[in-house]
Image: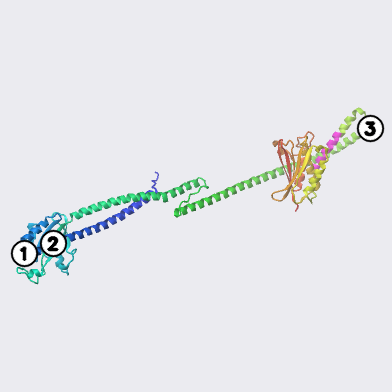
Amino acid sequence: MPKIRISLIAKLTCATSMILLVFMGLLDTVNLKNFRKVMIDYAVSNAEEVANIISQSAFDSMMKNDKASLYTMIGRIAQSDNIEHIRLIDKMGRVVFSNISGEIGSVIGKHADECIICHNSATPGAAASSLNRSRIVTTRTGREALGFTKAIHNQPACFTASCHFHGKDDTVLGLLDISISLEMLRKKSHEYRLQFIMLTCLLLLMIGVLVTILTRYFVDVPVQRLVRHSVLVASGDLESRVPVTSRDELGELSEAVNDMTESLGRADRELKGWADSLEQKVELRSREIMQMTEQLRRSEKLASIGTLAAGVAHEINNPLTGILLYASILKSDPRLDPEILPDVERVISETGRCAGIVKNLLEFSRESLPEKVNISIEVILDEIVTFFHKQPDFADIIITKDFATDLPQISVDTNQIRQVFMNLVINAGHAMPHGGVLEIFTRQSADGKYVCAGVKDSGHGIPEENMARIFDPFFTTKAKGTGLGLSISFGIIENNGGRIEAQSRVGEGTTFVVMLPVSG
């Protein structure tokens, strides 16, 4: 079941609304309480004014001894919509007048609500304030009303008049009890609460809209940017950045996320660099191992073939020497028929050629230790270039030199290395029968352990399928070649602690690079 997702804006809006509702409820309670208090104070003030009017009218009526007009006036006042109840009580607690005729003549005890404010307190009720002389009562109809009691005091004009009924020592002559309806107060309170609730709802709506807009602009949009950035980073896009549009906590978080992404990108690049470097090193090491394996295979092949060649050469050399000797004697014999002289010369030539092959086989099989000396590679190459400049076979070949400066000396057998470069130059000349460019160059290896000398021709090149066999004994593509020149050169270079490499492209030429160890 998928989880229900509640947005951050909805959470903040709901939380803000709940807080506002609580505070608005408390504010409504306090305001309503204060409003009721103010309205009751206002009602008390009105009741006191009415009581003062009736009290003054009672005084005037008593001075004229005209109770009928007083009762008439009180009855008219009692007809007001706000007046619930008006009655006069004498000092004995007897109701002498009331707008409710049924209670006239009844007696009210000291513990009644009208009397308790005076008789149940250490402070005389006559000195009590207006609020202390008021009370909230419930009328017979069940409605709420404000009861207000006012004492009618014995004034000098009363006990000095000729018609007085009270003595000088009487303080209170009676009570005026008025009940004013609070229905209007209840209606006003209800209207006030309704207005307050409507205002609260409008305020909540406006605050909700503002909170939503501000939260979306200041919180939701930056957070969504961070979420999108996280998705991009998780998908591998470490070049992505979060726009920093503020200087608050979210802005600082965006800067921190950008710094983290940059660090991840830097670490990723370093890891890729390490991986590429490791791959290159593994490839280089694999290539070196393959070259070493190939060299070992060739060395083993050369060793086995060399042993065989030495035996064959020794066995063939003696018969060849006899054939050559007797053919030479036959050629110098005057009795020889001149017609067969060319055949004898051909026998001598081919026998000499076989003798040369036997000589090469003996050189190939001979494992003489090199007599190493320290020498500059340029000295050897200059001698070879000078020698071949004078050869008629190289008349159409341009020989160029590209020698690096400040090369260290090498430790090799000079004669053997000279023989190697003689073979390489001769092979290059054979590859350019119609002329071309022969370049001889030198440089130092990257690790500084070898001096490299190369022979590069612009001849017909070597096919790719033959490149792996060019150093094998007796492998040749020449009609009259023995296939031992490069094999002998390979063995000489190995005996001198060096390596030889070849690169060729058909139609563009071939390059042989000889790497010889630096002296020391």
Q: Looking at the image, do the residues carrying marks 1 and 3 touch, with CB atoms under 8 Å apart?
A: no
Amino acid residing under circle 3:
Asp
Q: Looking at the image, do the residues carrying marks 2 and 3 touch, with CB atoms under 8 Å apart?
A: no
Q: Which residue is mark 2?
A: 53
Query: Does label 2 or label 3 sit earlier along the sequence?
Result: 2
Q: Which residue is mark 3?
A: 333
Where 42 falls versus 470 (above or below)?
below
Q: Nearer the viewer, residue 457 or 76?
A: 76
Query: Does label 1 or label 3 sit earlier along the sequence?
Result: 1
Magenta: main secondary structure equals helix
Q: For numbered disc 1, what is the local secondary structure? A: helix
Would residue 126 appear left or right of 239 to someone viewing this image? left
Read off the magenta span.
Answer: 349-364
Query: Does label 1 or label 2 sit earlier along the sequence?
Result: 2
Magenta span contains residue 327? no
Q: Which mark is residue 64?
A: 1
In three-dimensional space, the C-alpha distance between marks 2 and 3, rounded to whole angstroms, equals 187 Å
Q: Residues within 10 Å of mark 1 (few under 14, many from 20)?
A: few
Q: For numbered disc 3, what is the local secondary structure? A: loop
**Residue located at (50% from left, 45% from top):** 235
Give the mark toward the camera: 1 or 3: 1
Q: Is residue 397 visible?
A: yes
Q: What number of labels is visible?
A: 3
Give the mark toward the camera: 2 or 3: 2
Q: Residues within 10 Å of mark 2 (few under 14, many from 20)?
A: few
In three-dimensional space, the C-alpha distance between marks 1 and 2, rounded to whole angstroms, equals 17 Å
